[in-house]
Image (cartoon, rainbow, N blue to C red):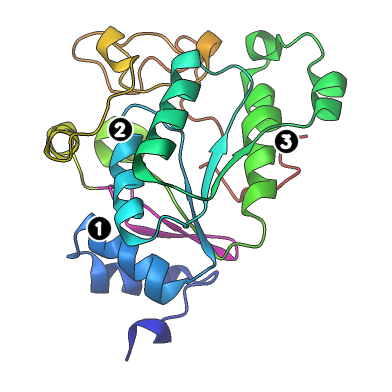
Amino acid sequence: MGVLDVNLFGDLSAASRFEERFVALDASAVLRLAIKDLFPGRIALVSSFGADSAVLLHMISTIDTATPVIFVDSGHLFPETLAYRDELVALLGLTDVRTVSATPEELAALDPESFLWSSDPDRCCAIRKVAPLGRAIDGFDAWITGRKRFQADTRASLPLFETEGERVKINPLAGWDATKLLTYLDEHNLPRHRMVAKGYPSIGCIPCTSAVKPGEDARAGRWRGKGKVECGIHLGVVSGGAGI
């Protein structure tokens, strides 16, 4: 049976078989397989341009600089994140980076004071992150994430391949640890996000991200004290109207 004979769409057992077959591949090989063989022209990388995003972005640039990269700008991001995006795009020669956001009309109707993050962070994320991403990936058969198992207990069993409704979600760095990420960044002389040196190993929106203390999970600074660990992008099928 050839690579393209495995149908992943909406089939959890097929996704499991696919993982068993290709789990031994390194991250770059998984990306090349997905971009060139499995989903040519139908796959996107979703990147936060966060602490270690340069790893996947660099790998993508060595495979095909025209691979669509989707970046969700919530309107509450650190200026350092926006600067890092621009720096990496220029450095790596990425030619199809798509910055998406909630529409002015949505924000005027649903978060006119830009303070929803304080009273209802789940809804804020749904409006400013989940729905814009849902619209952006509509029409793609697969998307790539940068999630890793070591980041938090909630990601400890993260697989290499997942099904998400009719789409496939691929996590090439699922098994990587912090040391391997740093080694890759050093070996390829990739610039660092400026917030990392300030104690932010996971970087989200300004009002919902704090520095991480020694011994804490990498994502412990996200929504601290809110009882929330994910923005919602990875908690179900992403759609353009999710939560709105």
Q: Which of pointers 2 and 3 lies earlier in the amino acid sequence? A: 2
Which type of secondary structure does the marked residue at label 3 adopt?
loop
Q: Which amino acid does label 2 sit on?
A: Asp
Location of the C terminus by quadrant is top right
Q: Residue at image x 47%, y 57%?
A: 66
Along the line of sight, the residue nearer the viewer: 126 or 200? 200
| Residue wearing tag 2 | 52
Mark 1 vs mark 3, CA separation in Å: 34 Å
- Based on the picture, tell me whether residue 17 belongs to the magenta stretch: no
Other residues around mark 1 within 10 Å, as few (<14) / some (14–19) / many (≥20): some
Q: Where is residue 142 in the image (x, y as percent from the top left)?
A: 51, 62
Answer few, some or many: residues within 10 Å of disc 3's Cα (few below 14, many 20 plus, some between 14 and 19). Answer: some
Let me know if residue 157 appears in the view: no
Q: Do the residues labelled 2 and 3 touch (CB within 8 Å)?
A: no
The picture places residue 201, in percent across and down from the top left corner, at: 30, 21
Q: Image height check: is 5 above or below 50?
A: below
Q: Name the residue under label 3.
A: 243
Type of the residue with mark 1: Ser
For marks 1 and 2, give the CA distance.
Answer: 15 Å
First in sequence: mark 1 or mark 2?
1
Report if the CB atoms under discs 1 and 2 are less than 8 Å apart.
no
